[in-house]
Amino acid sequence: MIDLTELEHDTISELINIGVGRAASSLSEMVEQPVELTVPGITFVERFSDTELAKAPTEVVSAVSQTFNGPFKGEAMLVFPEERSLELVRSLLKVDVPLDTLTDLEQEALMEVGNIILNACLGSISNVLGEPINCSMPSFRKRETRSLLDAEGSNTTGNSKPVLMILHVQFMLRHNDIDGYVLFVMDLNSIQMLRELVRRFLANSLG
Amino acid sequence: MAQQRSVLLVDDSKFARLLVKTFISSNYADWLIDEAEDANKAFEMVDGKSYDYLFLDFNMPGMDGLELGENLRPRFPDAVIALLTANIQQEIQAKAESIGINFLAKPPTEEKICAFIAAQEAAK
Amino acid sequence: MKKPSSTKPEKSKPSINLDRDGNAAELFAALLDTADTGLVALAPDRTVCHWNQWMQSRSGIPADQVLGKSLHEVFPETRLGRVSLAIEDCLKFGMPAVISPSLNQGALPLRPLPQFAASFERMEQSIRIHPIKTEKNGTLCSLIIRDVTLAVQRDRLLRQQAAELADLVTQSKRSEGRTRAILQNTIDAILIASDDGHIEPLNSRAQELCGPDGDPELRNIIRFLLPDSEHTPITQPPANRLLTDLGTGVIEVLACTLSGRNVPLEVAISHFSSDQRYHYIITLRDISQRKRHEMEIQRTMAELERSNSELEQFAYAASHDLQEPLRMVSSYTQLIARRYQGQLDETADEFIHYAVDGTQRMQRMIDDLLTLSRVGRHGKPFHSVPLDDLFDAIITNFKRAGSAPEGNIVREGPLPSVMGDASQLLLLFQNLVSNGLKYSDPETGRVRICATETPNSHKIFVEDNGIGIDPQYHETIFEIFKRLHGYGDYAGTGIGLAICKKITDRHGGTLSVTSVPGESSTFCVELPKELPIVVASESM
């Protein structure tokens, strides 16, 4: 179904890497410490249950999500196991008194981090492919992994089955590395549209 | 017209290499362009061959572009070495500049690459 | 669903038609100006096209100085910051943005409300940046700024309190650790029992005694000893396991551990209340060592008693059996003296005198020895003895014997009543008075009797103005047959003070002497007000 050529896959991966790199430099400037963000791998799966994340169905995760709409549409999400999200926010904020759960302010900070990363990924794709994408404001959710994708009246559930583009992202901070995921949940039409745009772009630029 | 130059592109993304290669060859048709997907391959390529331009991706599996540049700098004291990255953090930028490595923000565009080369050629 | 009724159509209609009346702009401007958030709109060329009342008051910059300028012209510090980048992304790519107070402290230079001015230089802000797509003007950008200074202040307070709490926890853990260490390293076994009969060993020593290698009976014994154990059925522990001597207040039990050791334990029980329940703290002290000592003392005591009574028996038997032949010698020498005095030569008379004197002295000694042995053997039960009466009798005795001139036995103040054997006390004080008179000038000799009191005893002093006693003899004078002077100087058997000593001993008291040689001697009899158990139950 998702018959991407190696070059197409590589292109999407590079666009995302560019986005994530920009996000890292923004974050680094904001928190005045080195922040590196890498995307060791991108995979496409048809079922959420096939993802690495779904292996711990009852683990509580924190997610920042933004829906996007344009030539292709869906929902983008930055997901961390709750503990990792606490670590991340506290490393970035240099908090010395950790509390057991995210406070409202920490939650908003995590939302901003998600916003920066998701904007950068979507922006990079949109910029290079030359197609504008409309994004919603980020929203925060905290729930068990297995119900992560349950709809909240979002537009991810079309008539067709969703396809997931999963990015494994790694934050490398001064004292620790924190692993999380960026999920792009799209329907089949959207992913085909994305592939079409990538093909068109490759054809144009490479002659 | 400018003289013939040899270029090495090091990037783990085939797409990125293709893009830069296309931008260069469509403006400097006779230039020789080699590619490597990581630092190890790059070391093989530079063995017994000399380059005028080296474009290095920062984020690569294994040795990153900055370290690679540091290793290649003494070998090609006159070559132009440029680090291509979207991650334009002060620290990385400062370090690159301190060892004589130029900095190019990703994504690469035709104007960006050509303007950079033109400036370097003019300085030679 | 029921459709709205057509009979009252005017209810669903707004009373003002904004479009028709053409005052929409006026209303919306008023709405924006009364909002309790900052509202800024930027045109595609990055210039400010709206700046609401809230922004004016919090930035101190009126709208007319802002409109048409870019944000970084108004706030130069924002030129390269997060806000500018987010605005750029919004206008260029239509990306919305969240700008949080934690990651961007005081993103815009806005004033905090007066109540926060002391702790906050700037207002803490939570900013949302939205693209606004318009048909006429393309994409605009809105900034919505909320004042979250109060939330930030609360968050700080929360963290500060959490830190204090964490400190407290650390401290209490440390002190708990120390308490635990003390408990663990205490030699005594400590257990805690709740009122439901549950017993928990608190330290390793208690664990040893009550654990798998300890005494399986011990918990039951402890339950038996607890004051209110009616909640749990208790079986009477074997008699040999309770060493308690009831009445002494000391509880001693014997633990027989499975490892085969028998450990005598002293049990102390204290209590405290917590969680509205009663708890007992049981301390078990290993008293093996003390028990061994006690047994040794008991054995020695028994040994001593036995040899003592043997000795008394011997003394009694000896003196009693000696009396018979002595009486015969004495009778016959006295007979010879009476019948042949002056009929033989002078030397014979002298010899007879010595023989008679010798037998008389020996008679007195044997009498005294018998008295001495009787002090132990024939003691009467103790009762209260008024010493004033006793001394009346003594003085009468001396008068009758003619051995004391009038007024030379002086009593000062009333004398107390003491617990004792009246006939022995009479003997004691008579001996002391007689002793005092004996070593004094017969003409000027005077014996003074007085008494003082301590919280636990009566002291009776018998003071003379005689020759005194050299301090080096103060201990030995109470030994039997000790004489400091030749028989010719002062009469006596050398047994009198030994009898006195023995009597005071039997009364649980002490007899001592102080003296100024050549001037006086003072004997002090100190008798306890309460008789010690040992003395009272003495069988001698």
Image (tube, rainbow, N blue to C red):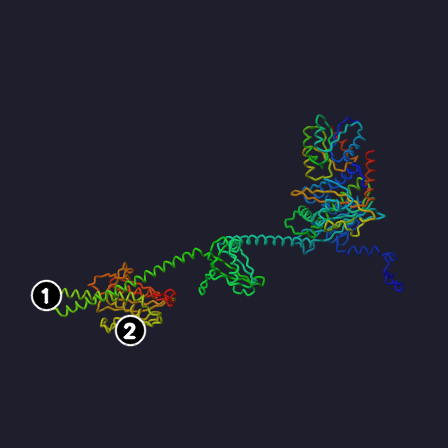
Quadrant where the C terminus of chain C is found in the figure: bottom left
Quadrant where the N terminus of chain C is found in the figure: bottom right
| Disc 2 packing (10 Å; few <14; some 14–19; many ≥20) | some
Q: Is residue C109 left or right of C456 when viewed as pictured? A: right
Q: Nearer the viewer, residue A181 or B113?
A: A181
Q: Secondary structure at mark 2?
A: helix
Is residue C390 something one can see in this rendering?
yes
Q: Chain of mark 2?
A: C
Residue that label 1 marks: C345
Q: Nearer the viewer, residue C91 or A156?
A: A156
Say whether mark 1 and mark 2 are on the same chain.
Answer: yes
Q: Is residue A17 left or right of C386 when viewed as pictured? A: right
Q: Chain of mark 1?
A: C
Residue C292, percent across and down?
A: 42, 56
Is residue A113 something one can see in this rendering?
no
Badge 2 amino acid: Ala
Question: Foreground mark, 2 or 1?
Answer: 1
Residue C391, percent across and down?
A: 29, 72
Work out whether mark 2 precedes mark 1 in sequence or the reverse, and give the earlier one. Answer: 1
Badge 1 amino acid: Asp
Residue A171 position by quadrant = top right
B59 vs A107: above or below: above
Residue farthest toward the right in the current orientation of the protein: C6
Residue visible at 86% across and 63% down in the picture = C11
Residue that label 2 marks: C393
Q: Are marks 2 and 1 in contact (CB under 8 Å)?
A: no
- Number of numbered tags placed on the structure image: 2
B54 vs C537: above or below: above
Q: Nearer the viewer, residue C448 or B100?
A: C448
Residue C398, percent across and down?
A: 25, 72
Q: Is residue A118 left or right of C236 when viewed as pictured? A: right
| Disc 1 packing (10 Å; few <14; some 14–19; many ≥20) | few
